[in-house]
Image: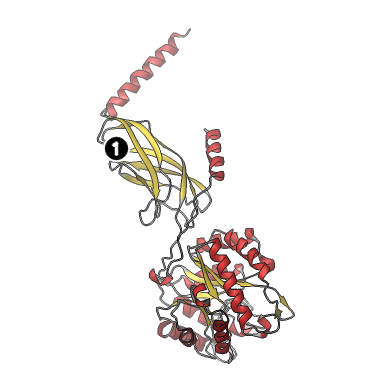
Amino acid sequence: MKAFLAILIATALVVLLPRNTLAIYDPGSVPNNKVGIHIFNENDLEDASALVNASGGDWGYVTFVITEKERDCDRWQKVLDRMRGLHLIPIMRLATKADGGIWKKPEEEEIANWVDFLNSLNWVVKNRYVVIGNEPNLDNEWGGKADAAAYATYLKSFSVKLKSASDDFFVLPAGMAPDKNEFAFIRLMLKTEPDILNHIDGWTSHSYPTASIDLYKDELKLLGKSFPVFITETGWSGKRFTEEEIGVKLISAYRNTWNDPKVIAVTPFILNYPQEPFAEFSWKKNDGSFYKFYSSIKDMEKIRGEPVQIESGQILAAFIQPVILHGLDFVGTILARNTGQSIWSPDSVSVGSGQSDLIVRSVSFNEIEPMRFGLIIFKAAATENTGVYSSTLFLTGTKQNKVTNGFSVKSVATKLDKMQVEAIFAKMGGYFRNLVNKGP
């Protein structure tokens, strides 16, 4: 039996699964928890989840940065898997590398490397939120000299290559520094690449209070087009306001300004960076404790998000008991692999059948994470018919939709009741005992 299962598993590893060709979905079309936070690295994920998913919330957002030298598939797949378990939606901001306070100007040749890296990951939710660069209207963010025309061309080229790899990439432009040249920079982008807005799926805004916490409205007005908005940076300086004042301002902003349906996510900058140059914006202190506004947002009532996740899998083998007794439930076993994004549990995945006379009573199995195998045991109601019983089993997802291939099983349904079967086996047992007692 072990050898048989090993062969089945090995076969599954080389099976080419069909590519999901569906496009991105509107994140505002499903229940959405827009509360989020910007983090420095993955060590802060647990604190982020405790913040954004508390008080009724679920599936909040986390923004983080990946640089060129950090393109390690194993590392970031582990990060995404942790975020999956913590119910955090990732927003990845892509960066080059810094040299003496100046970020290197991105190179066209690096786009292919980025696309290969990003497309190799199993993302947490269907939409793969990717922010291309950061505040390119600042000289130090673009190799020492800001260049709107160059950024527009780079953004368009990056988007085209991402979309050619997968329609699930949700392309976001870099958030602009709320500087006096921001709008002139955007106008020049539009002039250089007139169709640039056709190559982005949402708008990124750094709506700091130094400009306006609803700066995104002026930005959208300039664009002349409505986009879902991702405020990936915002926050109040601890040098100018007390921690109590910051808490009041954050709650007011979430309730009265960022409650705009166009705003999909707000990830204030930054959860844990108590050193310069960002100490004034850090939510965490040097001693490891949090400022009071962390608790203020943690205790704020939130929404239980329901992001779309790809649900898919493959059944390698399925068995049901060889004899089904009339009037009694029977059991079956399915060996399956989770090839999607969601974590399978008995609450989200069940067993379905192509035959209407199969009624599943219950399923039992340990959680099965993406790309893992698991054994699913189920109990079903007995068929009313007798004779050879044949059925095609498959797994269903959260929407009761079919998420795996079908697998045929067969059994014999009989009208014999339990007492009759026990009597038959008792006679068989007595017969074999007599044979043993007689000896050779």
Asked where in the image residue 311 lies, by quadrant, the reply is: bottom left
Please say if 439 is above or below 17: above
Would you say 275 lies left or right of 256 here?
right
- The amino acid type, in three-letter code, at marker 1 is Ala
389 to the left or right of 248: left
Q: Nearer the viewer, residue 437 or 197?
A: 197
Q: In this view, does 63 lie to the left or right of 35?
A: right
226 or 193: which is nearer to us?
A: 193
Q: Residue at image x 57%, y 89%?
A: 184
The colour style of the image is secondary structure
Total numbered labels placed on residues in the image = 1
**Residue 34 sits in quarter:** bottom left
Alpha-carbon neighbours of circle 1 within 10 Å: few (<14), some, or many (≥20)? many
Visible residue check, residue 301: yes
> What residue occupies the far top of the structure in this picture?
440
User: Which residue shows up at 43% across the image and 63% down it?
Assistant: 308
Residue nearer the viewer, 25 or 7: 25
Where does residue 120 sit, x and y in percent of width and height? 59, 58
Residue 421's spot in the image, x, y percent? Answer: 31, 26
Q: Position of residue 368 (x, y in %)?
A: 49, 51
The spot of residue 108 in percent (x, y) is 66, 70
Can residue 276 be seen here?
no
Q: Mark 1 points at which residue?
A: 382
Give the farthest residue toward the right. 100
From what the image shows, is residue 438 above or below residue 381? above
- Where on the picture, by quarter, is residue 383? top left
State whether residue 333 is above or below residue 401: above
Nearest the viewer among 420 and 343 is 343
Q: Identify which residue is drawn at 41% across, 74% down.
A: 302
Per the image, label 1 sits on a secondary structure element best described as loop
